[in-house]
Image (cartoon, rainbow, N blue to C red):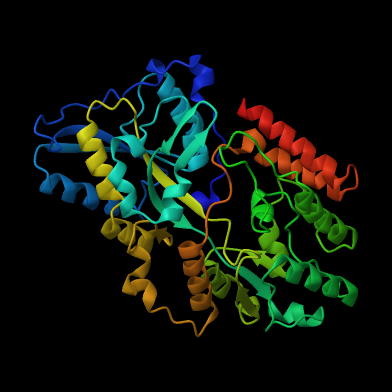
Amino acid sequence: MRALKKVAVMICATAMAGSLAACGGSNSSSGGSKDGKPSGEISFQTWNLKNDKYTPYFKNLISAYEKSHPGTTIKWVDQPSDNYEQKLSADAAANSLPDIIDAGPSLMYGLAKAGALMNISKEAPKAQNNYYKNAWDAVTFKGKDIEEGAYGFPWYVNDGPTYYNSELMQKCGLDPNKLPVTWDDYFSQADTMVNSGCGAYMSTMLGGSVDDYASAGIPIMNKDHTKYVFNSPEAVKHLQRFVDLYNKKGIPPEALSAQWSQQGEFFQKGSIVAMGGSAYSAADFKQNSPDLYKHLAVGTKISDQGKSASLAYEMLAVNAQTKNKTLALDFVQYVTNAKNQLSFAKKSNTFPSSKGGLDDPYYANIDTSDVQGKALKITLNSVKNGYSSRPAEFTDANGKDYLQQQAALALQGKQTAKESLDKAVKYANEKLQ
């Protein structure tokens, strides 16, 4: 799912010298009824979803649509996760993008800026009434050289709670019944842990993500998305707190490497107190680490805003030059309507972004008597009230990875917190040009 997919955008305009025509329509589309009713054929591309788990769902979904819309044909294609962004950019350059495309906002932004995606706010302005505001905001792009608007339809969304090793907390002088909520709570408890001499780390958070700043109420970009601003005095002070914690040996040195992926192992063996996860990580702990599961506590994401800033959305976009706009717009809204989103969310362990989906009895009757239920309830509230703080244009290549690198240098004492954020902002702003 998107929360586990690291994507970087290869901007279509670069490969095509800015040619809108080069980002043209699918060569698989045909038809389009003159009376406004869907007819003809379109292509619908998903991302790594053709497998034993999801194939029956999509086949039934498409079959039901074609049956209720005689004269329509939906060609479902699926691309593996490897090199997906390069595949989309190549298809755009070759004038062969599918009619409907599945990806996350960070990948879609480059295609939208190149003119390859339909501005839904112009073509179907009433559609936004069918989706939660935070979801619609996540697929709405603006900034330099891009017309403001939603460039797709929100599909599934995910987030998660923070898991704590309650047994380790007690060894480190912390109270498992008083989990940290705000950043002041977090750093205060981290100091208590360090001073206890228990030898554990608090977590792997190090100020290397925009979520770390947004959740502290620090703006990431200006309102018109023409400039990054996360090097404010408040941001510098926030990063310095991570630097200080690292110097006190409260953050594992391994976490400074972007390639490091053993966070889960550290948590399971009792080296770190807290770890982020999904709503369904608790079930994995129960099955694979039953001893740890007995000592699991679960809390909200750390935030000074009372809500999560780390929601991860997937979206479905429409090719700007589809030859069958009527069918493409109708089918994409069918896939993302409340009923179908809820059905897919249940199957994929994600959450729907269409209005009403989160109020379904499926979510209303969560049993919070155990860790799994508590984790699900916390995540449900996060999805309802939280938002995605990472700008779509802040891709891996356009600033995300660089911020992590600069934060790591600050923690290592190779430069100051201010120097790190100034460099990260300068780099990201240059990528906006």
Residue 196: quadrant of the picture: bottom right
Asked if residue 79 shows in the view, the reply is: yes
* Residue drawn at x 11%, y 48% as measured from the top left: 68
Q: Is residue 99 left or right of residue 324?
A: right
Q: x%, y% of residue 322?
A: 28, 27
Residue depicted at x 48% and y 82%: 368
Q: Please, is residue 110 above or below residue 371 in the view?
A: above
Q: What residue is at 90 percent from the left and 74 percent from the top? A: 195
**Residue 272 at least partly seen:** no
Image point (85%, 55%), residue name:
243
Horizontal and vertical percent position of residue 338: 29, 58
Image quadrant assignment for residue 100:
top left
Judging depth in this view, the residue of 163 and 395 nearest the camera is: 395
Question: How many numbered markers are drawn?
Answer: 0
**Residue 278 vs residue 425, the one in the foreground:** 425
Image quarter where the C terminus lies is top right
Q: Is residue 129 above or below residue 6?
A: below
Question: 375 left or right of 230?
Answer: left
Q: Give x and y (percent) for residue 146.
A: 48, 29
Direction front: furthest residue: 223
Q: Is residue 31 above or below residue 331?
A: above
Residue 396 lies, in percent from the top left, at: 62, 38
